[in-house]
Image (cartoon, rainbow, N blue to C red):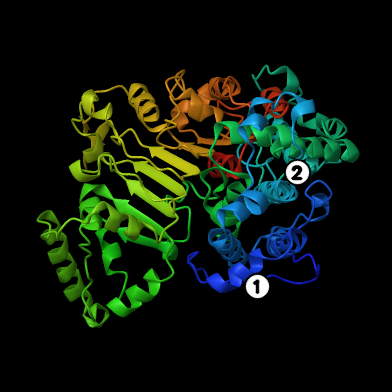
Amino acid sequence: MKRTNSENDKISNKEVKLMHDNSSNDNVLLFTQLPPEVVHQIVSFLSGSLQYNEFDFFSIRSKEELEEYILPLENIKTLNNLIKYTSKDLRDNLFLKTSTSDKSKTMNDESQKEELSLFEKHWLNCYNFQEILLYWIRTSDLDNLQLGTGDISRKEMIKMCKIQNLIQCKERGKIMSELSEAESSHYYDYNEGGSDDDDDNEDSDSDSSKMKKEKDTVPFNNKEQAQQDLKERFKRLVLNEKDYYLQQEGNNNNIFDLFIFKSLILSLGMNEYFDCDTKRGVGSRYLLPSEMIDQWLGNTGCSTSRWEFSDTKKENRKLNKMIGLSIEDPLGWERFITNTRFIPPKDEREEERNQRKEKLNEKLEEEKNPISLGPMLTESELSEKFSNFIFLNLKNIAFFGEQFKNYTFPNSIQILSLHFDSHNFYKNRPKEEWNNLFENVTFPNVKYLRIFVDESIYKIDYFGRKEKVQEMNGNVLKSLILQRLLQKNRFPKLNHLVLNEIASEGTLFEECDEELIKQLMTIEMILDREQEEGFQDIFESIKGLKSQLLKYVVIQTPLDPRSEGSVSFSELKDFYSESSFVFSIGYQSIAQYYYICNE
């Protein structure tokens, strides 16, 4: 964030380091003896003091300019250390003051509410600023669209121009003067001169000669109204005082924790890897740059990644900057809990290509007969090993072994990605085992959970022949996975949930812990091709959730006008009109349309 004492200061990129304890206890002790007003000035310098409801976001549309307001990682580390080293009384009274039980009980009685403390107001404002900043950065690419493109008819092209106008108006406060602004030079009318059988009333003019007339009927062309609507959208996105009390009543997160976590997402650039915003075909399973990830692989997957380093020294340099951890397959878990790391061969780069290939084949053969594992770590040793990471990716791991079936992951793990896509993971696993998925393992400080499920019901061989590896119906399987994972006692602080290809028809969240659903503030969903026709049902199921804290819903939305399952202009308008939360389509919806529109 731009420093408040110098609006022209530019924030330099900081070297990524873990939030370790580098502060001196003596210095922090002196800090705690300062008057509260002085302490507030210091933390305001570190966290920023721009008022979210007064800041002119409309005047800054460039992603590069917006990134100047991102809080540097060094500031987050400093704030975290100050909090950690202060006494409990000071944390409660100045930094982390939480509502008393009386506040929670009387949250609906305005006359009995206590006024927020100086620091409560400060952290609430900081959190809301970061929330809007993240939204404004995430949606910035929606400013530059041309959806009137591809092998579509003139009538379909007009529909896409209107949809672009709707998206940009509702999500960015941007209007059009003419629909032709959304028409791309790459547009090709494959139906030019022919008839169109589409009987959609909103797009009934298919004659290309009427395009000029259509230009005068832009659905949204009032700039002042568009910006006013966007301001109302911001109000629904942030936490007000009532939300603040409600969040504390049913959740263990305090407002300072939420602010720090939201700041981390921006500072680490996690938003560039969000599934719903990716410009690629699929999201990144790591949610962080790969150089920040320490990988522990098993029998499956790309074994060649173990030869990424040319020597151990280079590997150690990379490990020093890692804040993310990926453990893949049961063997990867066994290696991690026994500290059995594979050491790549030295000087491999100097070997001839055929020699390297031969050596690689030898190593792959060794994978079929895994090397002997070392002694298993104790729970305290395992927790110490996890304490270096804030992000954890678990791939095709359903159980953690007898010793760790009741394991509690340390508070350092705040971001969790669960990735299930191996045929071996699903193969011949009876329902009784699925009922015990993840056993009694808990993640007490995870705030962001991403679940990706590829059914892998069938294994397809080289000749295209299918072998069924899982007897259970795909929808039943997905529902069971959600039911087992989404439990409040497993994720007591969860507030951001991402589901990638796991939405099951008619059963979304139906069997999940209602108490956990109540504390969710953000839900994001990526649909597979088979689910697109059920988009409306999925949206309605989210609307029906009993969650007063739900603020933001992002769903990959099918836009292709040639598809029966695509969303219509009127449907999309209704989605944006939802008053209980803020709805977004995510840039992945645009990327998917651009990818298929020329087919």
Q: Is residue 34 above or below residue 182?
A: below
Quadrant that contains the N terminus: bottom right
Identify whether 432 is placed above or below 37.
above
Q: Is residue 355 left or right of residue 563?
A: left
Q: Please tell me which residue is depicted at 42% across the width and 49% down the height of the picture.
A: 285
Choose top left, top right, bottom left or bottom right for residue 474: top left
Quadrant for residue 207, please give it. top right
Q: Which residue is mark 2?
A: 172
Q: Amino acid at mark 1?
A: Ser
Element marked by disc 2: helix
Q: Is residue 553 visible?
A: no
Residue highlighted by disc 1: 12
- In the rendered image, residue 435, in percent from the top left (x then y), is placed at 28, 26
Residues under numbered marks 2 and 1 in contact, where contact means CB atoms less than 8 Å apart: no
Q: Position of residue 246 (x, y in %)?
A: 64, 31
Foreground residue among 387 and 532: 387
Give me the residue at 45% from left, 42% from top.
Answer: 450
Which of discs 2 and 1 lies nearer the camera? The answer is 1
